[in-house]
Amino acid sequence: LHVELNAVNKTFCDRVYPRGVASSQLCAGAEAGKSSCHGDSGGALVATVDGYAYGYGIVSYGKACGKESIPVVYTRVTSFLDWIEGHMD
C-alpha cells in the first residue's frame, strides 16, 4: 500500500508540534485522509526522482491519523547515513 504525501515546511510543523521538530526530522502528509497511522512506525517515506526510489524518511510519530493540517513526523534518513553505512555488512 502507498499514498502520495506532500512535504510540510518546518515552520508549519513546529506550530503543530510545540516542542519543535529537530533538524534530523521532517514532516509530511497534512492532507485529510492521507497520513501514516498507528502501527506504521518504522515504515518508509519514499521519494521517486527520475524513476528512482529513494528512502527519504522513517515514520516516527504523529498526533492524529489522516487529519487535515496535522502532519506526521519522519526521521530524516540523510541525517543518519554515516551510522547506517557503519552498521551494514
Image (cartoon, grey):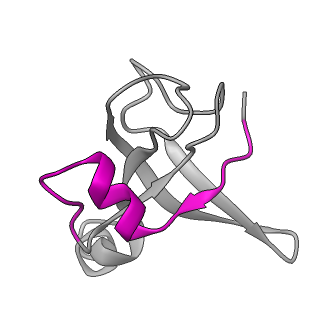
Q: What residue is at 51 percent from the left and 31 percent from the top? A: 36
Furthest-left residue in this view: 19
Task: State the image coordinates of residue 63 (x, y, percent, origin top left).
Answer: 32, 30
Task: Based on the picture, tell me whether residue 9 belongs to the magenta stretch.
Answer: yes
User: Which quarter of the image is occupied by the C terminus?
Assistant: bottom left
Q: Position of residue 79 (x, y in %)?
A: 30, 76
Taking the spot 40% from the left edge, 24% from the top edge, the residue there is 64
Residue 9 % position (x, y): 47, 68
Is 33 on the left or on the right of 9, as rendered?
A: right
**Residue sitting at x 55%, y 51%:** 45
Q: Hey, which quadrant is residue 52 in on the image?
A: bottom right
Compared with 22, 40 (above or below) is above
Residue at the (33%, 66%) spot, across then down: 88
What residue span does the magenta drawing correspond to?
3-22
User: Is 26 on the left-hand or right-hand side of 28?
Assistant: left
Front position in the image: 17 or 74: 17
In this rendering, the answer to whether 33 lies above or below 52 is above
